[in-house]
Amino acid sequence: MKEESPLSGQRIELERGSIAWTPCHIGKDTRIGDNCSIGALVHLGRKVTLGHECRIQGGAYIADGCGVGDRVFIGPNATLLNDKYPPSKNSMQWQPVQIGKGAVIGGGATVIAGCSVGHNAVLGAGSTLTRDIPDNEVWVGNPAVFLMMRNTYDEKQLQLKRKSASSD
């Protein structure tokens, strides 16, 4: 077996039970809550706030000033923007994204500057969010539109788990 490549990610222990996988970028004055996991190639800008127990998958980009609540999942290559008319180069014009507690941002999704995602809301993989998602709603598409309520989404997920368990 070959020796491990120098480009292989390494686990870095952060404070309060959080971890990050290298390489990744964590900007100045960024606050990371307890028990978070930050994947390789993640970019966390300056002054980002991550709540407790967040899972940020590899390749995600979170722009300066964005806020992420507790127990949020952000899928691989998802993007949270802060500049509605780039490149403004003027942080006074930025409109950082806010993600509510328990929300899910699917892989490859983009949240446009100034938008917010409500508590327990879901933005589907590959979607582009151009306006706010209310609490407990699931949105998909480009531009993203309402699909279902979160309780329906959770029930569908539970059905898949049951089906998978019964086929084992």
Image (cartoon, rainbow, N blue to C red):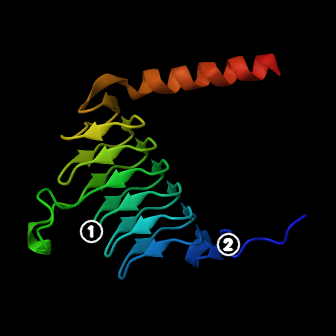
Say which of 64 and 32 sits in front.
64
| Residue 92 coordinates in the image, percent (x, y) | 9, 72
Q: Which residue is mark 1?
A: 65
Q: Quadrant of residue 5?
A: bottom right
Q: For mark 1, give the secondary structure.
A: loop
Which of the 4 quarters of the picture holds residue 165? top right
In the picture, the quarter occupied by the C terminus is: top right
Residue placed under numbered mark 2 in the picture: 10
**Label 2, residues with CA under 10 Å away: few <14, some 14-19, many ≥20:** few
Decide: marks 2, 1 in contact (CB < 8 A)? no
Task: Please name the residue shown 51% across and 71% down the image.
Answer: 24
Residue under the image location 35 percent in, 53 percent down: 79
Q: Give the alpha-carbon distance from disc 2 to disc 1, as whole Å.
A: 26 Å
Q: Can you give x and y, in whole percent of width and height, for residue 153 in the image?
A: 46, 25
Q: Percent from the top left, x then y, of residue 59? A: 48, 58
Considering the numbered disc 2 on the image, is that residue within a helix, a strand or a loop? loop
Nearest the viewer among 155 and 46 is 46
Outermost residue, right side? 1
Give percent across and percent down for residue 53: 53, 58
Label of residue 78 in the image:
none
